[in-house]
């Protein structure tokens, strides 16, 4: 097992086997569903050799690794004692429906993409071969190879059935049986059918997307209901057939038409946007903003939309075009940094991540370069946005979901103008992002002068520090002693707690209010030079829903050291049974050499409490 040691380390750092409910993967990341996310040691995970970054959101705890994740996941399953997509037993805690839906959708899309992208790339290769005249589209060799592409899309419901069944704990073979039945000659696209006298609408299930998803979800609940009412001795014999004969007619009567309406509804939305604002606006925006979506782990959510376009229209007017332009813009941005950098270590990083982005895998560049330097996001907004704008105005469409190396598929059925315009759009995106990144520069190579910093002399060199004032008077509490795992573990940054002796909260630095929770229990301030401070009042006080809290500022306001920004009725908070400790942390601690808390046992408001070593 090549990755055994890595898998064992990762399992331990996410809280051990007992903390893992499920683990799945997409093309570049492991997606964990954890019983207790606070038990995961995120910063230590980021330090592992094969880990690019960690993203934790409502969908999953995601460890970004790269394309080798395809080899790592099977080894991890073996260590965990899992097979395929099977999950360990749940804790009994009920998962919120929206969270569950997003998780299942995200986790189910990744595996389906593999054959779809293979089919798209094959379509591009065949288009090139046909273009050169080596093999004509009527040749049997061409038709045999093209049958792979046709089969992937025709039998798309089968692929969806397998993936969703695994993630919903539905029997895969029963799910595939339903999908194949819907694709049979007696049902697929047949007119005049009825069931027990009830007339069925004519529905084409081949190439479709939503009907089978709804069917598998329904099948899950049918199975659960039968397990409750059917004697256990009879379940093995009767449950499978009952699941099939209940699910099939409901799918034909309800889910087939409903899925069709959902697909047509999505097409209507895009038609409306295109006719009202111009479809170019959507292409431009997605090409510009895709790296942000990938950063937050939301890249897979467009799959149902563009898959529906291929199923219903035969082409994708937006996303295939946009993501190719965005990917090449990512490559261009990192390449711009490659030519700008003079540091050999940096140049190596930029070269590797640029090549990866060129191959269509942008996560290494985004998590290895974009998140660290930030300005490449702006470079892609410029380059990708310009390329997307051009492609949108030229009405470029994608005939298959491919990467850059499948550009030949844009020829479609002899649509050479579409192909040429796509090439121009790709060039615009690449060149625009490269130039923008080169001009914007690399922040770490610039001498940033902190006006409010104080010079400190050491034996080796002069460094700078930013002094953060105490936001409130009270007793100094070591952060590790705060009764909140996220803060105590320094996962949200280094800092300290203050047991308050007054109600007013003061601004600890000069800066901008970048976040203010609706419940007024937490506020984020960012200095002119990028230091990000979070002031969090109390433990679990979000549950008070704003009671006992008052704010004197709003998001976007500029504040100066000593300005009153919040008032919290500490006595009232204590009377409700909550700990009112005021926690102050530097959320971007990793950007600095260190963050040192004061050693004084008590602090007065506006007395230095934290030192950020720049």
Image (cartoon, helix red, strand yellow):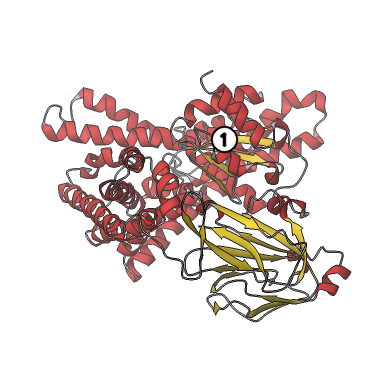
Q: In this view, does 250 lie above or below 375?
A: above
Q: Quadrant of residue 606?
A: bottom right
- Residue at image position (66%, 23%) is 81
Would residue 572 appear left or right of 111 to someone viewing this image? right
Farthest residue, direction left: 133
Q: In this view, does 186 lie above or below 528?
A: above
Residue 100's spot in the image, x, y percent?
A: 64, 47
Classed neighbour count for the residue bearing mark 1: other residues with Cα under 10 Å, few (<14), some (14–19), many (≥20): many
Q: Toward the viewer: 14 or 566?
A: 566
Q: Is mark 1 on a helix, strand or loop?
A: strand
Q: Toward the viewer: 556 or 411?
A: 556
Q: Toward the viewer: 204 or 379?
A: 379
- Residue at image position (33%, 68%) is 275
Residue 508's spot in the image, x, y percent?
A: 62, 71
Q: Toward the viewer: 53 or 546?
A: 53
Residue 354's spot in the image, x, y percent?
A: 32, 42
């Amino acid at each position: 097992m090549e990755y055994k040691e890595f898998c064992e380390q990762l399992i331990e750092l996410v809280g051990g086997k007992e903390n893992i409910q499920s683990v799945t993967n997409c093309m570049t990341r492991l997606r964990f569903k954890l019983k207790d996310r606070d038990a995961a040691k995120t910063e230590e995970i980021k330090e592992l050799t094969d880990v690019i970054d960690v993203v934790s959101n409502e969908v999953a705890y995601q460890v970004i690794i790269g394309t080798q994740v395809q080899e790592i996941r099977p080894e991890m399953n073996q260590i965990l004692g899992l097979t395929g997509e099977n999950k360990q037993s749940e804790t009994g805690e009920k998962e919120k429906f929206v969270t569950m839906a997003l998780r299942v959708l995200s986790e189910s899309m990744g595996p389906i993409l593999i054959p779809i992208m293979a089919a798209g790339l094959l379509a591009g290769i065949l288009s090139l071969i046909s273009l050169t005249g080596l093999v004509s589209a009527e040749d049997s060799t061409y038709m045999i190879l093209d049958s792979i592409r046709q089969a992937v899309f025709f039998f798309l419901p089968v692929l969806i059935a397998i993936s969703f069944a695994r993630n919903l704990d539905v029997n895969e073979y029963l799910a595939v049986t339903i999908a194949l039945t819907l694709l049979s000659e007696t049902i697929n696209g047949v007119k005049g059918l009825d069931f027990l006298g009830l007339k069925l609408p004519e529905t084409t299930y081949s190439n479709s997307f939503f009907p089978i998803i709804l069917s598998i979800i329904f099948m899950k609940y049918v199975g659960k209901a039968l397990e409750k009412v059917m004697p256990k001795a009879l379940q093995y014999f009767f449950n499978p057939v009952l699941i099939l004969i209940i699910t099939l007619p409901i799918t034909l009567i309800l889910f087939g038409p409903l899925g069709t309406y959902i697909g047509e509804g999505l097409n209507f939305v895009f038609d409306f946007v295109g006719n009202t604002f111009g479809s170019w606006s959507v292409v431009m925006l997605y090409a510009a903003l895709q790296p942000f979506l990938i950063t937050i782990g939301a890249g897979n959510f467009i799959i149902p939309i563009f898959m529906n376009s291929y199923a219903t229209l035969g082409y994708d007017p937006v996303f295939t075009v946009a993501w190719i332009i965005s990917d090449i813009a990512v490559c261009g941005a990192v390449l711009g940094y490659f030519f700008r950098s003079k540091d050999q270590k940096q140049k190596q990083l930029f070269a590797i991540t640029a090549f990866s982005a060129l191959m269509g895998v942008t996560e290494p560049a985004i998590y290895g370069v974009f998140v660290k330097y930030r300005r490449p996001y702006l470079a892609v907004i410029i380059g990708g946005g310009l390329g997307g704008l051009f492609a949108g105005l030229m009405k470029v469409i994608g005939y298959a979901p491919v990467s850059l190396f499948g550009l030949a598929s844009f020829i479609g059925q002899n649509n050479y103008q579409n192909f040429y315009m796509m090439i121009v759009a790709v060039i615009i995106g690449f060149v625009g992002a490269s130039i923008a990144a080169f001009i914007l520069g690399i922040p770490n190579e610039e001498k940033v002068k902190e006006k409010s910093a104080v010079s400190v002399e050491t034996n080796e060199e002069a460094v700078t520090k930013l002094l953060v004032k105490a936001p409130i008077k009270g007793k100094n509490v070591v952060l590790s002693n705060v009764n909140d795992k996220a803060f105590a573990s320094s996962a949200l940054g280094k800092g300290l707690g203050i047991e308050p002796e007054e109600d007013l909260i003061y601004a600890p630095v000069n800066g901008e209010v970048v976040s203010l929770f609706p419940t007024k229990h937490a506020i984020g301030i960012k200095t002119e030079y990028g230091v990000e401070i979070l002031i969090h009042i109390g433990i679990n006080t979000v549950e008070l829903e704003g009671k006992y809290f008052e704010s004197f500022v709003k998001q976007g306001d500029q504040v100066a050291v000593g300005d009153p920004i919040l008032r919290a009725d500490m006595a009232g908070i204590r009377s409700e049974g909550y700990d009112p400790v005021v926690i102050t942390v530097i959320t971007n601690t990793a950007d600095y050499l260190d963050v040192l808390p004061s050693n004084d046992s008590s602090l007065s408001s506006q007395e230095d409490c934290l030192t950020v070593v720049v």
